[in-house]
Image: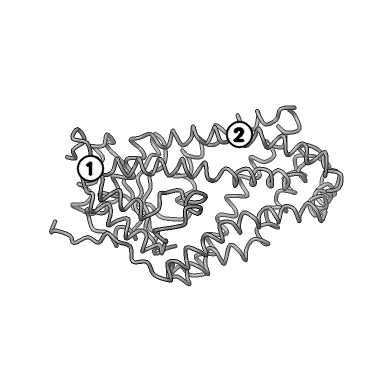
Amino acid sequence: MAHQQYRYEVRVTPEMIRHSRILDILYFADAAFGILLMLVILATGLSAKMRSVAARVTRRRYPQTLLWLLLFTLLTWVIGFPLDYYRGRVIPLQFGLTHQTFGSWMGDQLKGLIVGLIFTLLLVPLALWAIRRFKRWWIAVWLGSIPLMIIGVILVPVLIDPLFNKFVPFTREPLRSRLLAEATHAGIPNASVLEINASKQTTTMNAYVTGIGPTKRIVLYDTLLAKMDDDEIVSTMGHEMGHYVLNHIWKGLAFGIVISFIVTFIAQQIYDRGLRRWGARWGGMERGDVASFPWLIIVISLLSFLLSPVTNAFSRYQEHQADVYGIDVTGLNEASASSMVKFAEDGKINPNPSPFIEFWRYSHPSPAKRIKFALEYKPPADRKPR
């Protein structure tokens, strides 16, 4: 391939700074809005009223629970729709990050609603049963979350993701052969490399690795394939393969299990005490009562939000490891740096966020840090690329 003149500095524009600030505000606003909405549903007695409606339809607890969850899901979806519309459609359109029609966008929202409702109706009644049945219910809920996390990683790539996008084998030569050779060198023979029609929803670029065992796959956005040259794509793939080779999926699952242990343990203490103090005021709620579900959401959401710096720090660590591996296996320092420039500019992401914002909400090191590392890093002598 002819020598490529790369650029290693992100062009920071006022539009980029404004977009990043809006995303930062929305991150915290979403968390506050979700908790406030649940408090309103409890304090106004709306949750108890929905329970009464379900009780008038049927006397059996399980159908009552399903009906309450259906009403709750539809109610919160409708109330949250304006914020979802602003975040998911108005902002991307305003900054040129999507060409998706309203009909297509709305179709994706309805698919997400249906998928979320199915999982809610399947899993929440089990959790509420465990809360009623066991004194130390957090242990049962925590143990039950473990197989669900594993099943999710296995099944989501093959059952859920294709509902929103089309996945096809990547066939473009000679890039395909380079990627397969890279995968073989990385210890991933017969890797499944797929292209996704992400341009349906976004103009931004991405690539990721997901799945376990037969569902493992490395996915490239069609937008990335259109905007990056072959070396940049190979360097990006090196990073994504690093996640697989370094067992980041399994380590991520193990980390998630630990976080779930902490969250469920603390959640029981707060949930039980809160019901004893405010349950009567909210409509005579007892432990495991479906009408207390908004209170459980508040507790778990608040704990998850407070643990965001921890989970994001772990993610940044893994992303840095993948950056190291990608350069080790490809030797493409310059292409790696220039691809990160393109990612930042294409997504209109500020490459130099404030230390607090990066600490609290960034799942990757800031673009500026990643670019600097890619240009300065020298692989050890025993890790020369092939």
Q: How is the image coloured?
A: one colour
The secondary structure type at the circle numbered 2 is helix
Q: Nearer the viewer, residue 212 or 64?
A: 212
Q: Position of residue 113 (x, y in %)?
A: 60, 55
Mark toward the start of the polypeptide (1 vs 2): 2
Residue 362, placed above or below residue 322? below
Q: Position of residue 336 (x, y in %)?
A: 27, 51
* Picture disc at residue 262: 2
- Rate crowding at label 1 as few (under 14), some (14 to 19) or many (20 or more) other CA atoms within 10 Å: some
- Locate the N terminus and report the quarter of the image it occupies: bottom left
Name the residue furthest left. Answer: 2
| Quarter occupied by residue 96 | bottom left
The secondary structure type at the circle numbered 1 is loop
Check disc 2 and give the amino acid type: Ile
- In this figure, which residue is indicated by the disc labeled 1? 378
Q: Position of residue 164 (x, y in %)?
A: 47, 55
* Picture disc at residue 222: none
Residue at the image position 41 percent from the left and 64 percent from the top: 348
Check disc 1 and give the amino acid type: Lys
Mark pair 1, 2: CA separation: 39 Å
Q: Nearer the viewer, residue 354 or 135?
A: 354
Residue 305, placed above or below residue 259? below
Q: Is residue 56 left or right of residue 117?
A: right
- Rate crowding at label 2 as few (under 14), some (14 to 19) or many (20 or more) other CA atoms within 10 Å: some
Q: Position of residue 70 (x, y in %)?
A: 70, 51
| Quarter occupied by residue 241 | top left
Mark 1 vs mark 2: give the one in front: 1
